[in-house]
Amino acid sequence: MTALQKVLLGTPPKGEDGDSNRTANVKLNANVDVLNTQATLTSSSPTALRDLTAADMGKRMNFAPTANSTSHFPAAATTGVDQIVSVHNLSTAYDITMDVAPGSGDAAPALVVVKPGELVTWETDGVAVWRTIGRKKSLNETVQGNLTVAGNEVVGGSTTVGGNVTAAGKVNGANGANLLFNGSAEFGVAGWSTANFTAGSDSNGTYWSNAAAINVTTEDISQNIAIGANVPLALSYMISTAGVTAGRAFVRIEAFNSSNVSLGSVGTVVQPAIGQGWAYYSMTGITPAGTTYVRVHRTVDTSPAVSAGGVAFARIKVERGTVASLYSQESSVSSVGAVSSLAVTATFRNLIHNARFQVNQRYVASPWTATANYQYTLDRWRVVTSGQQVSWAAVNPFYAQVTCPAGGYEFIVDGSDNPGGTFVINWQGTATCEMGPVGSSTVLVKGQIFAMAQGAAVQFRWKSGTLSLPQVEQGTIPTAFEVVPYAQELSRCERYARVVTIDAESYQSGGQNAWWTINFPPMRTVPANAGLIRGSNPNYANINTPPVFSITQDAIVCSVPVTTTGTWFCVNYKMLLSADL
C-alpha cells in the first residue's frame, strides 16, 4: 500500500457499522509505514562504499571512498513507488559512480557521478526508472555535462581550458611581450643554432622539427636575452612528441652571469609526455642572483629515440611575470629586413671569410696534420697547434663541415674590415669558440653579443668539435647565414693568398736577360714567396734556373738569363704568394 487510509467511523451517534478496533488499528499501522517512507531524509553513515538496498530509501547515505568506485541502486521494483535516496561523497579526491542493479533492466538517471564533496538525490517510480532530482555541489564545481550561460560570465581568477576555445567575437586581455626573437620559426632559423631542428610549416603554422632520426642528446639554443637577477619569467610553448618513444623532449630557460657562466635553469623544467601530438606547456621561475642574460633551449635528451620528424616545437614565448599569456612575436623592420637578406647577392655583413669552407687554393687534402704552429690550410683558416689534425667534408654542394682540433681552428678578422661596435656570433656544430689571442681569450657561445674595437684584428678559434656556417655580424640578433657566391669569396681570399702561374716562353739572344711581368689585384700587403704549390714541378729550357722574382703588392717581375740565342721557356711553375695575417 502506498496511500494513507481513513478509519471508517460508521453511522453516528454510535457508529456500530464502522471499522472494528482491530481494523482501525491495522489501517493506522499501515499509515505509519507509508509515512515512514515519505518522511524527511535521515542520515546513514556506513562510510565504506557499498551497494544501496531498499532499506536505504528515504536516507542520506554518507560514503568516503578511498578510490574511484561504483555503487549500485537497488532494483526499482523492490523499493516501492515514489522513493528517494541521497548519496553524499565525503571524499576530497575520489568519484562515486552510481549504476542500476545488474540484471534489473532499470533506466539509469542522467547524472550518475557524485564528485568529491557533492550530494546527489534520486527518485524512483518503484517500477523500472531512476531519475536525478537534485545536486548539492561542493565549493569547487565540476560540470559533468555542457554549461550554457545566457547572460555574461565573470571570472575572478584564472581559467584553464582542456579543449579548444571558440569565440564568435574578439578575445581581449593583457598580453605580455615575447622577449624571445623568432619563437615559432616565423623567420626560418634566424636567432637559433640550426644544426639539429629545421623550420617547417603546415596548416597550423610554422614550427621546428628534426629532419633525421635522433638517438643522442640534441638541442638548439637561442640568442642571448638580456635580463637581470630576481626577475620572474614565464615560459610557454607547444610541443609534439608523436615520434618520441624514449627519452625526454622539452623547452627550458638557462641563466648566465656576466662571465658567461651558467647559473642553471630558471624554474622547474616541465617534462612533457612522449608519444603525443601537439600539447601546450608552461612554467614560471625567477632568474637567480648574478643573472645578466638568459637563453632558451629546445632539447631532446636522456637516451632518446626519435623518428625523423618525430618531435616539433612551436610558439615558444618568454615573458616577464608569473602567468603565461597568448603567443606573440615582437619584431622590427630591421630584424625582418636582416632575415630577408638570404639572397645570394652578398651584402658582406659576415666578417668571416670562406665561411662555407669551399675555397682551398693550396689544394690541402683532408684530413690534414699541421707541421707548424698557425699553419694555413683552407683559405683564411689555420691550425693553431703543430701536430694536430683538422678535417672537413661536404655537407652538400653548398657548404662543408670542419672537425676542429683541440688547439683550435682559427680565423682572423682583418682590422680593415672591422667597423667596431656591437656584434653577435653564431655557428652550427658542436665546437666551442674563443675570441682573442691564445692564453687571454674570451669564450663565446652561439648567439652571444660582444664588442670589438674599430680597426682591431681579432682572432676567432673553434675547438674540439664540428663547425659549419660561422657568422660574425654587427647587431644583437643573429640572422640567417649570409651566402657569398664562390667567385666573390675566392676574390676576397686572394687578397691574403694567391696562386700565381709563372709560365712563360719566348725567343731571346744568348747572354741577355729575359723579363716578364705578371699583374694581379692588390693584395693586403706585399706578399711573401711561399714557394711552389699544388705539386708544381717546373721545367726549363735554355735559361739559368730558377727565375729571379721581384714582388710588389700587385705584380711579380720575373727575370732569367738566356743561355744561348733561341727559344727559351719556363713551364709548370706555380707559386703561392702569402699576405695572410
Image (cartoon, rainbow, N blue to C red):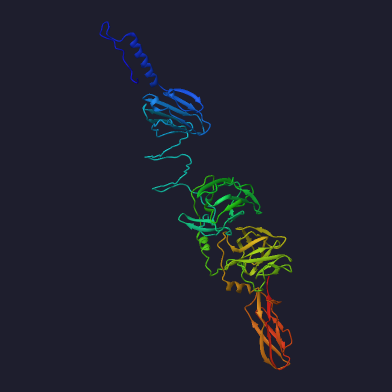
At a point 45% along the width and 27% down the height, the residue shown is 52
Name the spot of residue 536 as percent of width and height, x first: 69, 79
Q: Residue furthest front?
A: 103
- Image position of 156 with respect to 452: above or below: above
Residue 135 is left or right of residue 273, and the answer is left
Q: Nearer the viewer, residue 353 or 96?
A: 96
469 w.r.t. 233: above or below: below
Who's the residue at 46% across and 39% down the image?
Answer: 156
Image quadrant for the C terminus? Answer: bottom right
Q: Is residue 95 above or below residue 216?
A: above
Residue 529 image offset from top left, x and y in percent: 71, 77
Q: Horizontally, is 248 left or right of 124 in the view?
A: right
Task: Report the quarter where the N terminus lies.
Answer: top left
Regarding residue 297, the answer to whether it shows in the image is no
Residue visible at 27% across and 5% down? 14
The percent position of residue 223, horizontal first and vertical second, equals 58, 56
Q: Quadrant of residue 494?
A: bottom right
Q: In the shown orientation, is residue 308 left or right of residue 371?
A: left
Q: Residue at x 52, y 58 (%)?
A: 199
Q: Nearer the viewer, residue 434 or 172?
A: 434
Foreground residue, 579 or 190? 190
Q: In the picture shown, does residue 516 fall above or below 87?
A: below
Q: Give residue 209's quadrant in the image.
A: bottom right
Any part of residue 155 in sight: yes
